Image (tube, rainbow, N blue to C red):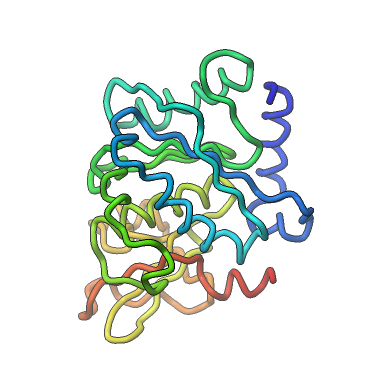
Amino acid sequence: MNRRAFLGAVGATVSVGLLGRRAFATEDPLVVRVWPSTRAAEHEPVGRLRGYLVAALEPVVGPVAVQRGEGSVDLPREGGRQVLSRRWPRRVLLGASGFGQINPVDGVNLLVTDGDPTVQPAGFARPGVAAATGASAVARMPPVDEIDPVVPYSIPAAATQLALHECGHALGFTHEQGSVTESEGGIVSSPMVGSYYWARPAVRDRQLNGAENACGESYPAPNLGGKRRLRLRYADCVTDRHQ
């Protein structure tokens, strides 16, 4: 894909957004191309992540094709703002201009590194481009068809949800399109809110900015008793509105 086509596709993503895309749906699937870093490739996270991306995105946007990018991406380190939010987007733009090894698509170009998903910043996204840490943790997740869509909090589940979170941002989702609900004696956070809900108050307030549930209810209190649970699908009411 050349630079003009790539930037045009990114502009369409900004205008239409993840939810609006369904109204303009064609038979062509949304393509999510995933590149592992060189260290992440040792864990082969793409195959495991593919199932979770398809299961979460298809109810919202229709058919999804998850592809592995050719080769792996050499990085000076596996996390940090410089790598996730600067180096990777530059690599994607260079690839769109015909330079380097990255051949971007007009859907989502996702980098997965072997960085620690509990250390911030753990991910990054802008239209058409996303990055997430936690490859070794994702690789420890069971196949998507062997577990429920809502799971107890764990580092592997949080890393998997992080990839869904950043892909959602790359397609136009905001934190306001996430949900946090009480269910089965626990608090369930969907991908577009994720672990931010249990972060320090200053971080939570900055990231969520007083957002309310996409489903209309107020967030339950973060210090409410109960187990932490993560949803590996986007919020039901958001999906239902666009089916």
Q: Position of residue 9 (x, y in %)?
A: 70, 36
Q: Name which residue lies at 53% across and 76% down.
A: 215
Q: Position of residue 12 (x, y in %)?
A: 72, 41
- Asked whether, in this view, residue 113 is left or right of residue 190, the answer is left
**On screen, residue 21 above or below 11:** below
Q: How many marks?
A: 0
Q: Position of residue 124 (x, y in %)?
A: 42, 40
Q: Position of residue 41 (x, y in %)?
A: 34, 35
**On screen, residue 229 above or below 36:** below
Q: Quadrant of residue 145?
A: bottom left
State the residue lying farthest toward the top.
Answer: 99
Q: Quadrant of residue 38?
A: top left
Quadrant for the C terminus in the image: bottom right
- Asked whether, in this view, residue 165 is left or right of residue 202, the answer is right
Quadrant for the N terminus in the image: top right
Residue 225 or 227: which is nearer the viewer?
227
Q: Name which residue lies at 60% across and 70% down.
A: 239
Residue 55 or 128: which is nearer the viewer?
55
